[in-house]
Amino acid sequence: MDLRTRNKVDVSFSMASMTDLIFLLLIFFMLTASFVTPSGLPVNLPTSKASTIEVQKVSITVTKELQYYVNDKRVNKSSLEEQLKPLLSASGGVVVLHIDESVPTKELVYVAGIATALEAKVTIATKPK
């Protein structure tokens, strides 16, 4: 009685399908990752020990000359709230403040107060130490 099988098992292992899978995952994560777009305005940001990356949808910049910019578009201090309302309703309510380190704290509080009154999450942009 012959009990041997007629089919022989190939013991070699092909890595081709594994590398295809790795490249597909790499492409997926590269396309779905959110990229941080830095503000193009010349602002000397303060430094901090802990710095996190926040997705920047609405950016408010205050330069050392106390000029206000919303998403790199210059606005008046009095019309800041009017400019923010439509942007915050479309973006989900995240505001990143780019405040020059020489700007008085009362200007930071003013801008943050407007964003908070519009129920936005406020984050201050800093440079890592």
Image (spheres, rainbow, N blue to C red):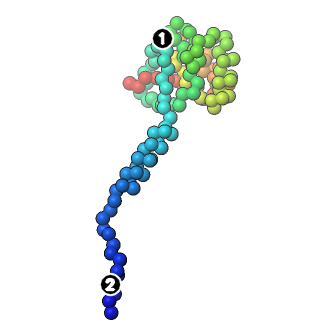
The answer to which image quadrant residue 83 occupies is top right
Q: From the top left corner, tell me how far across and down residue 125 is, in percent.
A: 49, 23
Q: From the top left corner, tell me how far across and down residue 27 is, in percent.
A: 45, 43
| Residue at 51% from the left image edge and 31% from the top image edge | 54
In front of the other: 13 or 44: 13
50 sits left or right of 107 in the view: left
Is residue 111 in view? yes
Q: Earlier in the sequence, mark 2 or mark 1?
A: 2
| Residue density around tag 1, few if under 14, some if 14–19, many if 20 or more, within 10 Å | some
In front of the other: 44 or 90: 90
Q: Considering the image in quadrants, where does the N terminus appear?
A: bottom left
> Mark 2 highlights which residue?
4
| Residue at 65% from the left image edge and 21% from the top image edge | 84
Single out the mark in the foreground, 2 or 1: 2
Q: Disc 2 residue type?
A: Arg
Position of residue 45 relative to residue 12, above or below, is above
- Tally the numbered discs: 2
| Residue density around tag 2, few if under 14, some if 14–19, many if 20 or more, within 10 Å | few
C-beta proximity under 8 Å, tags 2 and 1: no
Q: From the top left corner, tell me how far across and down residue 111 is, in percent.
A: 60, 17
Is residue 109 in view? no
Q: Disc 1 residue type?
A: Ser
Disc 2/disc 1 C-alpha distance (Å)? 85 Å
The residue most toward the left is: 12
- Element on which disc 2 rests: loop
- Element on which disc 1 rests: loop
| Residue at 48% from the left image edge and 44% from the top image edge | 28
Q: From the top left corner, tell me how far across and down residue 80 is, in percent.
A: 65, 15
> Mark 1 highlights which residue?
102
| Residue at 46% from the left image edge and 18% from the top image edge | 45
30 sits left or right of 123 in the view: left
Position of residue 20 relative to residue 32, above or below, is below
